[in-house]
């Protein structure tokens, strides 16, 4: 991904976050966030995400299921093909420009200074962490699954 593309994404996300926090975007009360399902057959796992919205009225086209397992990141559209992996996995939905679609929600979501803190982090560290690189950022939460135990942390 080029630096120009990353900058465009940064501007779009920052603008969306700022609008959301300012109340300019629709309330999240009517949103139906995706439902994540992770199943294991021995050590092999399969993750899917489906919209909990039978009428299709509250969806975003750029939401993605994200699975970080075995040192690599895989993504899929919500309602798209399942993601397969082996062993433990960090799983989340990255909901595009509107944070109320994220599963689980980011730390600090809705708090004063949330957008400013994210923008400052992006300016210092770049954008790669948004879709699965495990670093020490203070925002992105994951559901953690392990074979034989299922969900062990959210």
Image: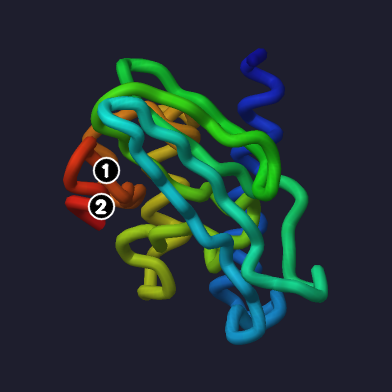
Residue 29 coordinates in the image, percent (x, y)? 59, 85
Q: Are marks 2 and 1 in contact (CB under 8 Å)?
A: yes
Residue 12 appearing in the image: no
65 up-or-down from 3: above or below: below
Estimate how packed mark 2 is, as few (under 14), some (14 to 19) or many (20 or more) residues with alpha carbons within 10 Å. some
Residue 148 coordinates in the image, percent (x, y)? 19, 41
Estimate how packed mark 1 is, as few (under 14), some (14 to 19) or many (20 or more) residues with alpha carbons within 10 Å. many
Residue 32 coordinates in the image, percent (x, y)? 62, 73
75 up-or-down from 49: above or below: above
Q: From the viewer's perspective, is 119 left or right of 96?
A: left
Q: Of the numbered discs in the image, which one, if any, rests on residue 151?
A: 2
State the image quarter where residue 120 is shown: top left
Residue under the point 38% across and 74% down: 112
Residue that label 1 marks: 145
**Distance between the Cα atoms at labels 2 and 1?**
4 Å
The local secondary structure at tag 1 comes to strand
N-terminal-most mark, 2 or 1: 1
Q: From the viewer's perspective, is 146 left or right of 118?
A: left
């Amino acid at each position: 991904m080029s630096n120009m593309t990353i900058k465009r994404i940064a501007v779009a996300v920052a603008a969306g976050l700022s609008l959301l926090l300012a109340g300019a975007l629709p309330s999240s009360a009517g949103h139906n966030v995706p439902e994540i399902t992770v199943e294991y057959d021995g050590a092999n796992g399969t993750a899917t995400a489906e919209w909990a919205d039978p009428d299709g009225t509250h969806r975003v086209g750029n939401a993605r299921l994200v699975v970080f397992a075995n040192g690599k990141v895989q993504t899929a559209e919500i309602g798209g093909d399942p993601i397969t992996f082996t062993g433990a996995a960090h799983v989340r939905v990255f909901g595009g420009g509107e944070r109320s679609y994220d599963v689980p929600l980011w730390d600090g979501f809705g708090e004063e200074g949330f957008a400013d803190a994210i923008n400052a982090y992006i300016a210092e560290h770049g954008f790669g962490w948004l879709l699965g690189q495990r670093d020490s950022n203070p925002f992105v939460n994951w559901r953690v699954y392990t074979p034989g135990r299922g969900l062990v942390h959210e």
